[in-house]
Amino acid sequence: MPTNKLTIVPVKLDPLPTETSSFHSSQYTAAPGCIIKTAIAEIAFFNGVDERIIQTIMKELKSR
């Protein structure tokens, strides 16, 4: 039986803002390079994200 090494990547999900404010943090001023929408989640990748993180997320989406 083959053994695959698993990589666990901690992820923090921020809640969507319920109201619009005039303050915008620098985190949200850049446009994402890619957005993946599923029935239960919306995933945004920004330029400069590590390739390992993208691969891990894609593997998780594929296994569901």
Image (cartoon, rainbow, N blue to C red):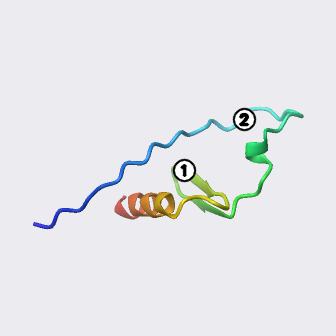
> Which disc number belongs to residue 11?
none
| Res. 49 image quadrant | bottom right
Would you place residue 18 above or below residue 51 in this image?
A: above
Secondary structure category for the residue under label 1: loop
> Circle 1 sits on which residue?
41
Q: Residue at x 45, y 43 (%)?
A: 10
Q: Residue furthest right?
A: 22
Side (left or right) of 27 relative to 2: right
The quadrant of the rendering that contains the C terminus is bottom left
Q: Residues within 10 Å of mark 2 (few under 14, many from 20)?
A: few
Q: Residues within 10 Å of mark 1 (few under 14, many from 20)?
A: few
At x 73%, y 32%, the residue is: 18
Residue 35 placement (x, y as % from top left): 63, 61
Q: According to the image, label 2 marks what residue? A: 17
Is 2 placed left or right of 60 in the picture? Answer: left
Residues at circles 2 and 1 in contact by the CB criterion of under 8 Å: no
The amino acid beneath tag 2 is Pro
Vertical position of residue 35 compared to residue 21: above or below = below
